[in-house]
Image (cartoon, rainbow, N blue to C red):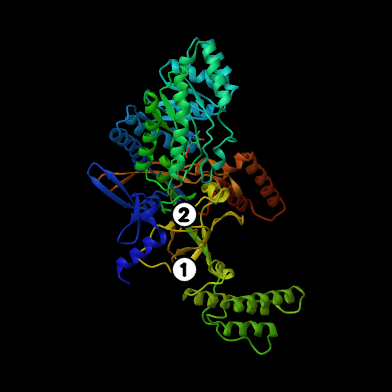
Amino acid sequence: MPHNAVKADVADLYRIGDWGAGYFGLSDDGNVTVSVDTPEGRVSVALLDMVFGMRERGLQMPVLLRIENLLDAQIARLNESFREAIRTLGYRGEYRGVFPIKVNQQRQVIEEITRFGACYKHGLEAGSKAELIIALSMLNNRDGMVVCNGYKDREFVELGLLAQKIGYHCVFVVESPSELPTVLACSKALGMRPRIGVRVKLSSRVGGMWTETSGDRSIFGLTTNQLVDVVDTLKARGMLDCLQLLHYHLGSQIPNVRDIRSGVLEACRYYADLVQEGAPMGFLDLGGGLAVDYDGSNANHPHSKNYSLHEYCADVVEAVMTTLDPVDVPHPVIITESGRATVAYASVLLFNVLDVTRFEPEEDEATPPGKDEHRLIHSLQEVYEAIAPDTLQECYNDALYYLDEIRDLFRRGQIRLRSQAIAEHLFLRIMHALTRVLALGGPVPTELERLPETIADIYYGNFSVFQSLPDAWAIDQLFPVTPIHRHAEPPTRQAIIADITCDSDGKLDRFIDAHQVKRTLPVHRLVDGEEYYFGVFLVGAYQETLGDLHNLMGDTNVVSVRINADGSFDFVKEMHGDSIADVLSYVEYDPRELRERFRDAAERAVRLGKITPSERQQVLEHFGASLRGYTYFER
Ligand code: PLP
């Protein structure tokens, strides 16, 4: 096949150009690349070269790769898109982004967001006391806002107020009626006037996976009645001038731009009326929701979005103007708390494949069963010989029936292990033959639609779904998955990917596709002695801290790279993942005590003459090395 044809096919299979947002692509020699703009032009680097760099530095797979340039690029795209919309539509206010810390609390991420975001006055959103402490210590530009959401006790509010005293722009968003008295009491005690925001429950509902976050029954936010109470309380205390911000959050990953627009329109009605009540206001905070196009289909469904960033910004700005201009309300500062869209692109989970299970009859065993085999095995052989385009359903039914019968005989001890093996092998031949005929085209009987999955390979990936891709397990989130190399050769196998936890849910068996979810992924045949690497992309949002220790697979190694203008790259930070001793201590084992206990067992063995003292030493050294080791499969 000519080279370009392979490349076009690969692009189609994995849709990299669609979900890659211009950051990820394919090189002519078949590598997945990451491309960034630099002052000297656009440069691309193969992910495989980064993997080689990790190998040279002794960093084992799996590795979470963070590409700092992509964090910067997303912050720039967001801010520049709003600036452009503001300029072209003649909006008389500005845009201020705040990054919600909960979406990725990792220090390196927050450090980069605050460093690069300073030129845009990008701030932080804190939803807990711990996050507020991160915000106050990491935010180095005083113009950036600190939006305090979440349940707030006195300690939370006092810390925010003291921060305000030393120059931080903190706003306390009242999320429930019980919070206002706390904010007022703390402010009084400290002799300060707080900056207050209110979070409202909008009646607008959104589609997608977080539809529960919106509407009357959403957990957070004030009802209209409660909002009126807040206004009245502030008026009664002569503190209505403290009410400066209106906030709502309709949910994450909103796929339909029309839902975003109707949210803004409704929120602006609240905003306008609060101004008319006498509150100074000034800030309109639309929360998160800006979606990531995980499958690259640019459509209104949960793993995608039907709008561009440009359209999102223009629609928001325009909707604010449409509502506020007729009632002569000055344009507010527009805030968004975009988390997912800011950080998703910057992280890629890289892992190697350890092994494969094939569900495939061996090529050289086409010989029919021997005369002495059970009649049901001969019946299976007849099914095999009867396969034709017009007998697919019938052959499928018969094959299942005969295999069940044979297994039943085996359970009752009426046929032997080797006969059952012949039957299962024959069954597999039938399934493959059916799949081959199906692939020729023509109508596919419904029951046979999922046949290709049942014979797909299982590739064992060196990672844990529960630790590194928790949303893939918990909420069926789709992430783009591709081999990161070998794309110059066509993939000849179909596979699902299992992780190395011993949990049947620890697998990736739903993959992105243009119009529906694909049940298998095209992959290359494993080559003896050669590593085969995969990347799971767009995993920078929510995955790191939601991950858990299932099977005691700990945090992976993390490497942050920065790509330079000359196409080289630096490993700017690296963090070794959890050792076995680390994860054991998380579940309250003391590694020193474990070593002691094992030492006692070894010493007893010496006493009983099972091992020599020097063997004891060897055993103990091995135990110690295991405790220091990585929790994943080490080559
Ligand atoms: N703001 C609030 C209040 C949230 O609850 C969330 C997350 O759901 C976000 C912002 C971030 O949303 P997203 O990641 O969709 O931008």
Q: Quadrant of residue 107?
A: top left
Looking at the image, tell me whether mark 1 or mark 2 is earlier in sequence order: 2
What's the residue type where badge 2 is placed?
A: Phe
Disc number for residue 351:
2
| Disc nearest the viewer among 1 and 2 | 1
The front one of 391 and 17 is 391
Q: Is mark 2 within 8 Å of ligand 1?
A: no
Is residue 571 visible to us here? no
In the drawing, what numbered circle is on residue 493? 1
Secondary structure of the residue carrying tag 2 is strand
The single residue placed furthest to the left in the displayed view is 40
Residue at 63% x, 81% y is: 380
481 w.r.t. 428: above or below: above
Other residues around mark 2 within 10 Å, as few (<14) / some (14–19) / many (≥20): many
Q: Callout 1: few (<14), some (14-19), or many (20+) C-alpha neighbours within 10 Å?
A: some
Q: Which mark is residue 125?
A: none
Ligand 1 within 8 A of label 1's CB?
A: no
Picture quarter with the N terminus: bottom left
* Image x and y of residue 388, in percent: 54, 82
Give left or right: position of 412 versus 355. Answer: right
Q: Which percent across, then down, holds residue 332?
A: 38, 26
Residue 609 location (% of width, % of height)? 70, 55
**At 54% from the left edge and 42% from the top edge, which residue is drawn?**
211
Give the CA separation, mark 1 to mark 2: 19 Å
The relative height of residue 188 versus residue 152 in the rendered view (above or below) is above
